[in-house]
Image: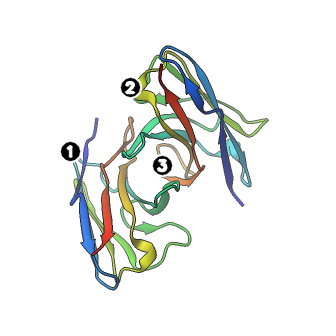
Amino acid sequence: DIVLTQSPATLSLSPGETATLSCRASQSVSSYLAWYQQKPGQAPRLLIYDTSKRATGVPARFSGSGSATAFILTISSLEPEDFAVYYCQQVISWPLTFGGGTKVEIK
Amino acid sequence: EVQLLESGGGLVQPGGSLRLSCAASGFTFSSHAMSWVRQAPGKGLEWVAAISGSSNNFFYAHSVRGRFTISRDNSKNTLYLQMDSLRVEDTAFYFCARGQLGAPPRSFDFWGQGTLVSVSS
């Protein structure tokens, strides 16, 4: 199974700062990586798919990059509503797997 | 508007069974693979099972294979998860999720709000 490792576990930032979240895969997932945002008490929301494609309605301040085993989610100029937990997911092979998550909290 | 509404969660004893349902609306249900994803309280996401649009293909996480069965009824726009031989570690919120168009596996572009399954004696 492909293991996804997210870092850091927690990121403490202020509104207006840039968040850089990392996701590393135990083997190549090519470009088949997605990012989700989850707020307390809510279902996850798709932000980025295929490494860098923004899902419908996702603001341009969210961007994804990377390939093979190393991926980055960048949130430019954090808005108050961006403080949440973010998960990466590989969709290249079964079983599908998620990373452990990165919590972006207000500093 | 795409909607996914889960139901069927509840409290069950270890070794018991439960069937979850996910009613879909607002899209052509049969065109999309569907999945179940769970989240233990305060923990991360775990993919559980997936089924292709035509029910030709099924996929399961190692942790539930042989105990859980995913199915769908395209005439009723409904996804199911039959959970047998439940364990305490199956306690979680269970979400149904829609796969993006295209050959699975694909990312999940819509999610239901989840239903809580509690396994306890």
Q: Count the numbered circles shown.
A: 3
Q: Are marks 2 and 1 on the same chain?
A: no
Q: Chain of mark 3?
A: B
Image quarter of residue B71: top right
Q: Chain of mark 1?
A: A
Name of the residue lying farthest toward the right: B75
Local crowd at mark 3 within 10 Å, few (<14), some, or many (≥20)?
Answer: many
Q: Is residue A29 left or right of residue B51?
A: left
Residues at marks 2 and 1, CA–CA distance in whole angstroms: 20 Å
Mark 2 lies on residue: B63
Do the CB atoms of the residues marked 1 and 3 lie less than 8 Å apart? no
Residues at marks 2 and 3, CA–CA distance in whole angstroms: 21 Å
Residue A64 picture location, percent across and down: 34, 68
Which numbered disc, 2 or 1, marks the residue closer to the eye?
A: 2
Image quarter of residue A3: top left
Look at the numbered disc 2 and give the secondary structure of its residue.
loop
Local crowd at mark 1 within 10 Å, few (<14), some, or many (≥20)?
Answer: few
Q: Is residue A53 left or right of residue A20?
A: right
Mark 3 lies on residue: B106
Look at the numbered disc 1 and give the secondary structure of its residue.
loop
Residue B37 picture location, percent across and down: 48, 41
Mark 1 lies on residue: A26
* Numbered label attached to residue A104: none
Rendered position, B62 above or below B35: above
Tell me the amino acid under the disc marked 3: Arg
Look at the numbered disc 3 and give the secondary structure of its residue.
loop
Residue B99 picture location, percent across and down: 55, 48
Tell me the amino acid under the disc marked 1: Ser
Colour approach in the figure: rainbow
Q: Are marks 1 and 3 on the same chain?
A: no
Which numbered disc, 2 or 3, marks the residue closer to the eye?
A: 2
Tell me the amino acid under the disc marked 2: Ser
